[in-house]
Image: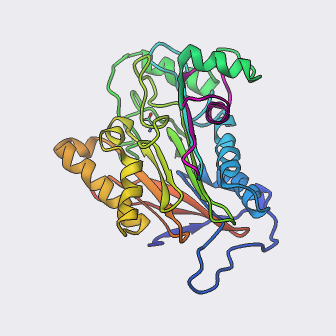
Amino acid sequence: MLHRRRFLQLGSLGLTSFSFAGFRSAGAARKPIVISTWDTGIAANAAAWQVLRNGGRALDAVEKGVMVTEASQNCCVGLGANPDRDGFVTLDSCIMDEHANCGSVAFLERIKHPVSVARRVMEKTPHVMLVGSGAQQFAVAEGFPLEPQVLSPEADKAYKNWLLKSEYKPVINIENSKNQTAYAPTRFENGEWNHDTIGMVAMDAQGNLSGSCTTSGMGFKMRGRLGDSPIIGAGLFVDNEVGAATATGQGEDVIRICGSHLVVELMRQGHSPENACKKAVERIIRIKGNKAKDIQVGFIAINKQGEYGGYCIQKGFNFAVCYADDKNFLVDGKYIL
Ligand code: GLY
């Protein structure tokens, strides 16, 4: 399962060499554990791990973790990300805990941490989802500052480049087609792609599961477009009896199969996290037929035993796994096409 691991040094992320966890007696679940999508997951996992290693709740870990990515100006998540085709950054996020409590915000503008607003929706309202100006109004009422409506320098450059053709041809995260910069939602900088989404799932020392997912969505998308990331069951699903899963990539195709819910249900039927992710990817490929080669979708999952796995449509997806002070590493997702 753990093929082609690339272990990364954690010193630069401020983690100590103090060994707390990662110890497992035979048959015991590996916990705590946190996994998240893409290489940006390394820094996010490191923040989540600080919560988990101190006995904190998985819910707090998955919020703190993805906040790191949301705050990054050089990433396609958060306010530094690519705008929609009208030039506005709109953010989607959701969070879910071990009691099936969940909260979500979508089409949210000018708020730095949509995942924290999603958590407030979960904890302070009788609802699950708030969108658009209503979500923003709620965030401001809850004390979240309204940030200036300006594009980051990188997003401004990418948007101006896109405007040259203004061609609406959304394609998402196909790393092996690096000539697609005119439309791509991701940015190619310093030899690295930045990705559209971070999804994170975790199990704490008490054995409870939680997850979060946050994104700016497809770059240069139609105004008002939502993907899978704010939709419970599509971009994220947690069942404390079974496991948790999250998704990245072309949201429309994740929604079509209720992807993350499907992965958890497959784990309930006895599939390993990796095999459950693979079966969900196969279902998308079956539906898409020839068009599957034009898209990327990746799933990651953990189960109650602390086993983890991921699968994607095509080469280029990876995810970050952390279960000890000195174990925060990238795993290349296995792929089908
Ligand atoms: N997976 C992110 C999106 O499609 O918006």
Image coords of residue 119 (percent x, y)? 65, 36
Specify whether residue 76 is in view: no
Most distant residue in the bottom direction:
26
Give the residue drawn at x 47%, y 70%: 4
Image coords of residue 107 (percent x, y)? 52, 22
Magenta-drawn stretch contains 109 = yes
Along the line of sight, the residue nearer the viewer: 74 or 133: 133
Q: In the image, is residue 222 above or below residue 278? A: above
Image coords of residue 288 (percent x, y)? 21, 43
Quadrant in the picture for residue 112: top right
* Direction from residue 50 to residue 329 in the image, left or right: left
Q: In the image, is residue 167 above or below residue 122? A: above
Quadrant in the picture for residue 296: top left
Specify whether residue 44 is in view: yes
The N terminus: image quadrant: bottom left
Quadrant in the picture for residue 248: top left
Specify how the rendered protein is coloured: rainbow
Image coords of residue 259 (percent x, y)? 37, 47
Along the line of sight, the residue nearer the viewer: 86 or 62: 62
Most distant residue in the front direction:
126
Along the line of sight, the residue nearer the viewer: 96 or 52: 96
What's the magenta region?
Answer: 99-127
For the image, the number of numbered tags is 0
Which quarter of the rendered image does ligand 1 occupy? top left
The C terminus: image quadrant: bottom left
* Direction from residue 23 to residue 175 in the image, left or right: left
Give the residue drawn at x 42%, y 37%: 228
